[in-house]
Amino acid sequence: MVSAAFKNRTRDEIIAAVQESIRKKQEWIKQSDEEFKRIREERKRLAV
């Protein structure tokens, strides 16, 4: 079964799409890590 994301695309387009997906995932991970860090710092401050 071929995913709709890969159907009728050239090899270079597929590679670019996968790289963009990885970049977005890394950006999401970075943002979520920053958010968790902010929440932990806020909880520490409130616990004191």
Image (tube, rainbow, N blue to C red):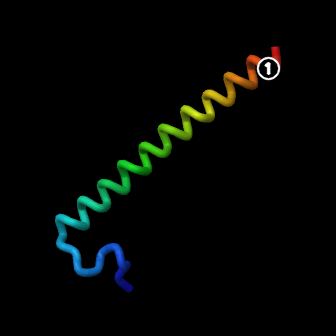
Specify whether 7 is left or right of 21: left
Q: Percent position (x, y) of residue 31?
A: 51, 38
Specify whether 26 is left or right of 47: left
Q: Percent position (x, y) of residue 5?
A: 34, 73
Q: Is residue 27 above or below residue 21?
A: above
Find the residue positioned furthest to the bottom.
Answer: 1
Q: Residue at x 22, y 75 (%)?
A: 9
Q: Secondary structure at mark 1?
A: helix
The residue that disc 1 covers is 46
Q: Quadrant of the C terminus?
A: top right
Q: Residue at x 67, y 22 (%)?
A: 41
Occupied quadrant, residue 26:
top left
Find the residue positioned furthest to the top.
Answer: 48
Q: Is residue 4 above or below residue 37?
A: below
Q: Residue at x 35, y 82 (%)?
A: 2
Occupied quadrant, residue 45:
top right
Specify whether 20 is left or right of 11: right
Q: Percent position (x, y) of residue 16?
A: 24, 59
**Three-letter amino acid code of the residue under disc 1:** Leu
Q: Quadrant of the N terminus?
A: bottom left
Occupied quadrant, residue 8:
bottom left
Q: Nearer the viewer, residue 42 or 19?
A: 42
Q: Residue at x 74, y 20 (%)?
A: 44
Q: Is residue 37 above or below residue 11?
A: above
Query: How many badges with numbers are in the image?
Result: 1
Q: Percent position (x, y) of residue 28?
A: 48, 45
